[in-house]
Image (tube, rainbow, N blue to C red):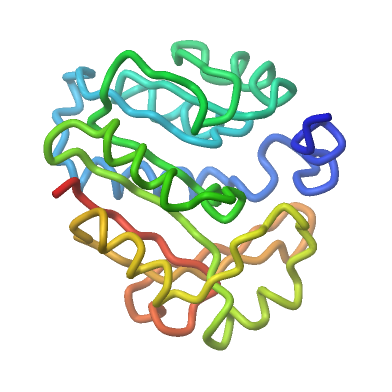
Amino acid sequence: MNKFDQVYFDKHYSSQFDKNPKSKIKFYLKTLIDIQEVDLKNRESKLLDIGCGYGIFLSQAEKYFRTYGIDVSEFVINKAKKVAVNTIFYTGDFLEIKFDKKFDLITAFDVLEHIPDLRKALDKINLLLTDKGIFMCVIPVYDGLFGRIGRLLDRDVTHIQKLGRKIWEKMLFDKFLIIKKMGLIRFSIFPTWYLHIASAKLNDQSQALMIIARKK
């Protein structure tokens, strides 16, 4: 039985847009566009979103890129296809699926902490990137002031990689050239309000990190 089924998503994401407000998605997308200095009239760059979930990010990204999404959950992919209608989707384990193309950008938002073999995953991401391609990830960290609070509040048993920021940074540095790093504070305060703050000043104490890296 797939542990990322409807029961999982209903438990941790009460709706498609829970924990994914428009302001957060807009920030992710603007950060990518600024880093790549993309021509907004030219949708030639290929973007793969790993663990794409409901496809909320892809629904906006497909306005600027040729988009592809992958998720292990058949349930959520069926939902994503209705949200990001111009995106090509894959269903299955990222480590097992064979891709017939390379990508200019690969994103993984709150995904790596679910993967047992991180080094294998990072090797595959590196292999799938074009020369000087960009990898952008968001990962929870469990050290620092807000990281420790996040650990206490974390009820997701599929978070198997509960690592500190220095360990994450070293693993990524071994594979990529890190070009930008930002600390993130995010909490669901009310059912309809999601706090999301991003700043490089929060790198040492944040609840999560956004790391943007380039293929060496």
Horizontally, residue 30 falls left or right of residue 110, namely left
Residue at 56 percent of width and 88 percent of height: 145
Up/down of 24 relative to 141, above or below: above
Horizontally, residue 153 falls left or right of residue 81, namely right
Horizontally, residue 158 falls left or right of residue 182, namely right
Q: Quick one: 17 or 100, which is closer to the camera?
A: 100
Residue at 74 percent of width and 67 percent of height: 154
Up/down of 154 relative to 41, above or below: below
Image location (x, y in percent) of residue 190: 77, 61
Q: Quick one: 78 or 14, which is closer to the camera?
A: 78
**Quadrant location of residue 55?**
top right
Residue at 37 percent of width and 72 percent of height: 199
Of all residues, the one furthest to the bottom in this rendering is: 145
Image location (x, y in percent) of residue 139: 50, 59
Image location (x, y in percent) of residue 156: 76, 57
Count of labels shown? 0
Horizontally, residue 83 falls left or right of residue 180, namely right
**Quadrant location of residue 13?**
top right
Image location (x, y in percent) of residue 135: 30, 45
**Quadrant location of residue 102?**
top left
Up/down of 41 relative to 30, above or below: above
Residue at 34 percent of width and 48 percent of height: 136
Up/down of 91 relative to 61, above or below: above
Quadrant containing the N terminus in the rendered view: top right
